[in-house]
Amino acid sequence: MSYANSRIPASAQQGVHEHLAARVGTHLAHPFRKPVADYNRSAHAQAFAGWDRCAPLILDAGCGVGHSTIELARTFPDHWVIGVDQSEDRLQRRKPYPEALLPANMVFVRADLVDFWRLLVDDGLRLARHYILYPNPWPKIGHLGRRWPAHPVFPFIPRLGGVLECRSNWSVYVAEFALALELTLGRPVPWGTFETGRPLTPFERKYRDSGQTLYRLCVDLDAAT
Ligand SMILES: C[S@@+](CC[C@H](N)C(=O)[O-])C[C@H]1O[C@@H](n2cnc3c(N)ncnc32)[C@H](O)[C@@H]1O
C-alpha cells in the first residue's frame, strides 16, 4: 500500500458493538486482578526516575515511534511527558530531531499499558493530560475484547483524571470509547470529527494525507459536571 492511500478499517461492524455495554458493566463490577509483570514494574520506575514529583504529568499511551511525545514535551515544557509503547522497535526508530535537541522533560518506556495504567492508579498518580492516539482498531466483530473500551483495564483509564483525548480514523472506535466512558462516569461524553492542520502523529499524518475523516473524543475528567 502506498503512503497516502491508507484505508479506513474495514469491518462488518457498522456501529457500537451490541455487547459493549454489558462488557463494560462486567468490568466495572469485577476488579481486574491480572498480576503485573516485572518488566512493567521496571518500566514504571524508569518512567518516573527523572520526574521532580512536581511537574504535571502527561501520558502518551501507545506512542509508537514517539513523535507525539516529543511534540507534547515541546508544547508543555513545564510538564513531565511519558511515552509508553510495547514495541521496542518503534520506540527506537529515529526521531525527527537530533538527540541533543530532544526535550529533557520526557521519557520513553517500553511497557504493556495493561499493567502500566494499573501501576499509575496503584501509586495514586493523577495525570494532567492523557493521549490515546490512533490505538490499534481491532475492527473485527470478534475482536471487541482487544479494543481498549471493552478491555478489563478500561475502568482504570478515567481514574487517572486529567484531560483525556482519544483519536482514531474509525468512527466506531471513538463511539465505543465514548460509550464506555459514559457508562463509567455517568455523564455524556461528546465526540466528533476534527481536522488537523499539523498532525501530531505519523498515523494522523498518513490518514490526513489519504483524505480520511478523523474522529476525536476529548473530555476533562477533573471538571465539575
Ligand atoms: C496504530 S499504532 C499508533 C501509534 C501512534 N500513537 C501514532 O498515532 O502514530 C498503535 C500503537 O499502540 C501500541 N500498543 C498496542 N497495544 C499496546 C499495549 N498493550 N501496551 C503498549 N503499547 C501498545 C502499538 O505497539 C503501536 O505502536
Image: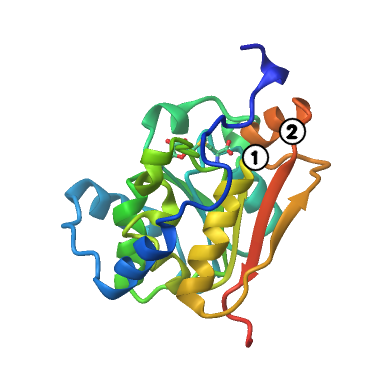
Please name the residue shown 65% across and 29% down the image.
96
Q: Disc 1 designates what residue?
A: 169
Q: Is mark 1 within 8 Å of ligand 1?
A: no
Q: Secondary structure at mark 1?
A: loop
In the image, is 92 to the left or to the right of 204?
left
Which amino acid, mark 2?
A: Gln
Disc 1, disc 2: CB below 8 Å? yes
- Residue 123 lies, with reference to residue 94, above or below; the image says below
Residue 98 occupies which quadrant of the picture? top right
Q: Are there few (<14), some (14-19), or many (20+) residues within 10 Å of tag 2?
A: some
Q: Could you tell me residue 178's position as x and y percent?
A: 57, 62
Please name the residue shown 47% across and 51% down the image.
17
Q: Are there few (<14), some (14-19), or many (20+) residues within 10 Å of tag 1?
A: many
Asked if residue 77 shows in the view, the reply is no
Mark 1 vs 2, N-terminal side: 1
Q: Disc 2 designates what residue?
A: 212
- Residue 95 lies, with reference to residue 149, above or below; the image says above
Please name the residue shown 83% across and 42% down the image.
197
Please name the residue shown 51% across and 43% down the image.
135
- Residue 208 lies, with reference to residue 57, above or below; the image says above
Q: Residue furthest right?
A: 197
